[in-house]
Image: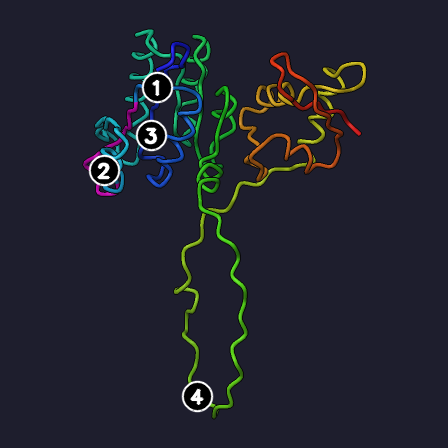
Amino acid sequence: MQENEKIIALLIDAENVSQKYIQCIISEVSLYGTPAYKRIYGDWTLPDMSGWKKMLLDNNLSPIQQFRYTQGKNATDSAMIIDAMDILYSGHVDGFCLVSSDSDFTRLAARLRESRMTVIGMGEQKTPGAFKAACDTFKYLEVLYESQQPKTAPKKESRPAKKFAAKTDVKPAAHPEAAKPAPHPAPVTFDLKELTRSIREILEVESDEEGYMLLSQIGVILSRKYPDFDTRNYGFSKMYKLIEATGAFDTKAVTSPGGGKIWAVRAK
């Protein structure tokens, strides 16, 4: 482990998150640091938790059992919150990754940030805005999941040869859609025009005399303004490609202090 590597506590609400997201969760949190704590919470006596059990060993997750004392109430909330505070006071971490779509963790995220902890939130698009705003950055699980799916080239349609056959009374199946494969979750869509407007506002205040501003600085301000900002939300892997797609900005390459090339942007 590098000396300046950040230590992250990964806490997952298993009763609120599907096990299919585990690989993208682990991959994404690793971009921010080393997940030294990897705990997952739920009532493991319930049959609908069986899908998670194989994932525990494969991903070195520590299951935390929490019985449901009230019917229909998520049992993980209190256990996750208590553990998070214990980890915070241990002084052994630099940040937390809270994986849930539940607004009950809003106050926890805010409290951790008050203690100068970096808070990464992950959840589905249905996550309430209050929880997203309480995090330093928030990632949509649907977007992370889709970005890791292998892209296949579209198949060319081949026209079947015409055959002259006698008409029959055979009818098509009553429910042909039942044979179709289950679709992936609908991609999260965001308004590119709204993003363009926000970038223009940033440039008006922060740009130099020629109207240019470093692309990396724009990205930092957007992340502060919108905790759920991510270029992948718009279908782009890089900020530069997203800026080009708007068609509203000029770009130029400048030399960084280290000698490399970086991009600067200004409004057209």
* Foreground tag (3 vs 1): 1
Q: Please state, as top left, top right, bottom left or bottom right, where the C terminus lies in the image.
A: top right
Q: Which residue is mark 2?
A: 53
Q: In the image shown, does 92 or 185 lie closer to the viewer?
A: 92
Tell me the element at label 3.
strand
Tell me the element at label 2.
helix
Mark 3 residue type: Asp
Q: CA distance from mark 2 to mark 1?
A: 20 Å
What residue lies at 42% left-to-right and 62% top-to-bottom?
180
Q: In the image shown, does 53 or 66 lie closer to the viewer?
A: 53
Q: Residue furthest left?
A: 45
- Where residue 249 appears, as percent x and y from the top left, is 75, 30
Question: Does label 2 or label 1 sit earlier along the sequence?
Answer: 1
Tell me the element at label 1.
strand
Per the rendered image, the range of residues in magenta is 38-48
Q: CA distance from mark 3 to mark 4?
A: 54 Å
Q: Please state, as top left, top right, bottom left or bottom right, where the N terminus lies in the image.
A: top left
Q: In the rendered image of this protein, does residue 73 appear above or below residue 260?
A: below
Q: Which residue is mark 3?
A: 13
Label 3 neighbour load within 10 Å: few <14, some 14-19, many 20+: many
Q: Which residue is mark 1?
A: 9
Question: Does label 1 or label 4 sit earlier along the sequence?
Answer: 1
Q: In the rendered image of this protein, does residue 154 appear above or below residue 140?
A: below
- Image quadrant assignment for residue 65: top left
Tell me the element at label 4.
loop
Q: Which residue is mark 4?
A: 169
Mark 4 residue type: Asp
Residue 254's label in the rendered image is: none
